[in-house]
Image (tube, rainbow, N blue to C red):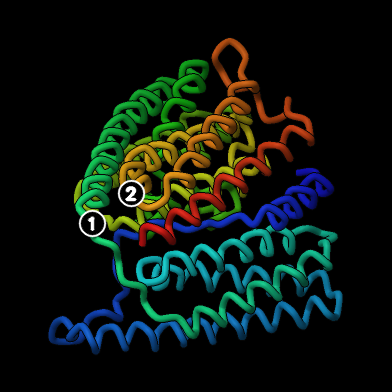
């Protein structure tokens, strides 16, 4: 990746105040005792204490990063940022369900911090600003109380409608992935390349759900460098083989495992329990998943179909918006109108980057076009953040 372009994107993300939450279909193990469920009061207290411990631990790691930053030790900046990110990934499920909006705020600063610190010549001024904001967010987390969930009939209906959409997309993902992997196993490169994009679109529309199921998302969607090379599989491992002219014979076990993992995802999706705030949080994550990884060209490193991924993220987010619209109109019609306008504006911009009905390759975008998309995504995400606060 071009280092200067990455710095521009990080600065754009910071300036547009992107928010990145996620859905969670599982609960922290801390909610249970050895013999059974804790009482509501005890469980809540335990969660709050657990959150304080998590905040304290992350602050310690952040302090190590800040020290390296002040010393301008590039090697240690990269190392401590990686440690901080790794720790967050191990702990984040404890925050997602009980404090989805604070989870959003932490990732708003941590993700660009990690991306920026990973560069050979990091922008230290930007990193200091991100570190300061992240520290403030962790302080809020330490002092946070668990918010009560809105439970209106309108919102419950919205959740049910969205769950139907997720199940439909999961079914389409299973079918399209089977076709894709069959082409890979048949060593039909052109057919496999064509079907790769279709499968990816179905996955990207429901990615926040997939990310909530432990190690399934890394098994299906990990990029090169995200996991140990010996464990790397899923879509992107096959993507590399297809576009780098590697032997597809070696991809047969990878294809078989991908099918198994996608089927497992479908079964888990059927059983997932969603709450209104989590659903709105999922819309924000889809927008910001596009803004943080798709817009930088890091996701589809070999096929370069990043705009297709970005478009699928927006489509998934818009589906959530359509389902929660009745509830939002009850609370704030003006905000609903703004969201509608911004979704249309973003969709029009995305469609301007299509040729013959297909998105152009990421490499055909100019830096100005990338910046424009990032800014529009940021505005839309802020509005979705306001929606989550209104509906919670």
Image quarter for residue 48? bottom left
Instruction: Determine the residue located farthest toward the top in the rendered image.
Output: 356
Residue occupying image coordinates x 53% and y 34%: 341
Residue occupying image coordinates x 51% and y 62%: 104
- Disc 2 to disc 1: CB gap under 8 Å: yes
Expressed as whole percent of the image width and height from the top left, the position of residue 117 reads 74, 64
Residue occupying image coordinates x 52% and y 41%: 338
Name the residue that disc number 1 marks.
Answer: 152
* Cα gap from disc 2 to disc 1, whole angstroms: 11 Å
Residue count near mark 2 (Cα–Cα under 10 Å), binned few <14, some 14–19, many ≥20 = few
189 horizontally vs 36: left or right: right
Foreground: 212 or 128?
128
282 horizontally vs 288: left or right: left
* Secondary-structure class at tag 1: loop
Name the residue that disc number 2 marks.
Answer: 330
Visible residue check, residue 309: no
Visible residue check, residue 259: yes
Image quarter for residue 49? bottom left
Residue occupying image coordinates x 68% and y 83%: 63
Foreground: 387 or 291?
387
* Secondary-structure class at tag 2: helix
**Is 387 above or below relative to 200?**
below
Expressed as whole percent of the image width and height from the top left, the position of residue 253 reads 39, 39
Quarter that holds the C terminus:
bottom left
């Amino acid at each position: 990746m071009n280092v200067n372009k990455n710095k521009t994107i990080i600065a754009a993300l910071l300036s547009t105040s992107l928010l990145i939450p996620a859905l969670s279909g599982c609960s922290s193990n801390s909610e249970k005792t050895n013999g059974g469920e804790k009482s509501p009061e005890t469980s809540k207290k335990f969660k709050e204490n657990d959150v304080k411990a998590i905040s304290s631990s992350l602050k310690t790691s952040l302090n190590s990063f800040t020290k390296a930053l002040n010393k301008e030790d590039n090697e240690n900046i990269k190392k401590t940022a990686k440690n901080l990110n790794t720790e967050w990934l191990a702990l984040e499920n404890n925050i997602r369900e009980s404090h989805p909006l604070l989870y959003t705020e932490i990732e708003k600063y941590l993700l660009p911090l990690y991306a920026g610190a990973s560069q050979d010549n990091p922008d230290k001024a930007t990193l200091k600003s991100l570190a300061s904001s992240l520290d403030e967010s962790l302080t809020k987390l330490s002092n946070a109380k668990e918010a009560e969930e809105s439970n209106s009939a309108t919102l419950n209906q919205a959740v049910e409608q969205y769950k139907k959409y997720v199940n439909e997309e999961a079914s389409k993902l299973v079918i399209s992935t089977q076709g894709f992997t069959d082409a890979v196993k048949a060593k039909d490169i052109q057919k496999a390349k064509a079907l790769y994009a279709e499968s990816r679109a179905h996955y990207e529309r429901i990615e926040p759900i997939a990310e909530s199921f432990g190690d399934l998302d890394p098994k299906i969607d990990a990029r090169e460098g995200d996991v140990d090379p010996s464990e790397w599989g899923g879509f992107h491992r096959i993507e590399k083989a297809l576009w780098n002219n590697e032997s597809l014979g070696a991809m047969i076990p990878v294809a078989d495992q991908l099918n198994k993992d996608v089927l497992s995802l479908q079964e888990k999706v059927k059983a997932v329990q969603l709450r209104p705030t989590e659903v709105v949080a999922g819309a924000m994550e889809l927008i910001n998943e596009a803004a943080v990884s798709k817009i930088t060209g890091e996701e589809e490193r070999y096929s370069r179909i990043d705009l297709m991924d970005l478009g699928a993220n927006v489509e998934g987010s818009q589906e959530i918006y359509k389902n929660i619209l009745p509830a939002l109109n009850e609370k704030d019609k003006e905000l609903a109108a703004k969201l509608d306008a911004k979704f249309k504006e973003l969709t029009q911009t995305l469609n301007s980057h299509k040729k013959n009905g297909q998105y152009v390759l990421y490499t055909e975008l100019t830096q100005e076009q990338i910046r424009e998309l990032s800014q529009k995504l940021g505005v839309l995400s802020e509005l979705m953040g306001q929606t989550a606060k209104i509906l919670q």
